[in-house]
Amino acid sequence: MSEIMEEMDEIRKEIRAISHKLDILMEERERYGMMRSSERSLSPFLIEEPDIYNVSDCKLVYWC
């Protein structure tokens, strides 16, 4: 009987670990979704805005 209880405890621990990993995954997906939504909603605004700085304003320019 104690073997069954030990196995059940082990299963519970595994379920908690999986649940925790799923929570983390869902948070990351929500964060990614919010960033994509923000990026898409700001895109038209940023495209219409004039550039404040240009290359000649830079003290040092790295060319790739």
Image: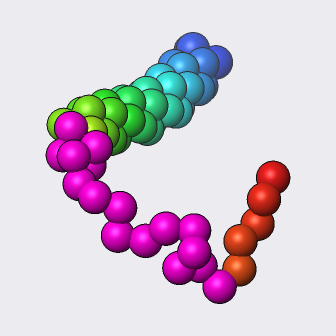
Q: Quadrant of the N terminus?
A: top right
In terms of image quadrants, where is residue 25? Answer: top left
Q: How is the image coloured?
A: rainbow
Please provide percent x and percent y for residue 48: 21, 46
Instruction: Please indicate whether residue 18 sits to the left or right of residue 63 in the image.
Output: left
Instruction: Please indicate whether residue 61 sits to the left or right of residue 54 in the image.
Output: right
Could one spot residue 30 in this view of the protein? no
Q: Is residue 53 above or below residue 5?
A: below
Give whichever of 62, 19 is nearer the camera: 62
Please provide percent x and percent y for residue 3: 64, 18
Please provide the residue range marked out in magenta. Answer: 44-59
Residue at the location (28% across, 43% down)?
Answer: 47
In terms of image quadrants, where is residue 24? Answer: top left
Could one spot residue 3 in this view of the protein? yes
Give whichever of 30, 18 is nearer the camera: 30
Residue at the location (60% across, 19% down)?
Answer: 7
Instruction: Please indicate whether residue 50 sits to the left or right of residue 57 in the image.
Output: left
Q: Is residue 23 above or below residue 63?
A: above
Q: Residue furthest front?
A: 56
Q: Is residue 28 above or below residue 6?
A: below
Give whichever of 33, 59 is nearer the camera: 59
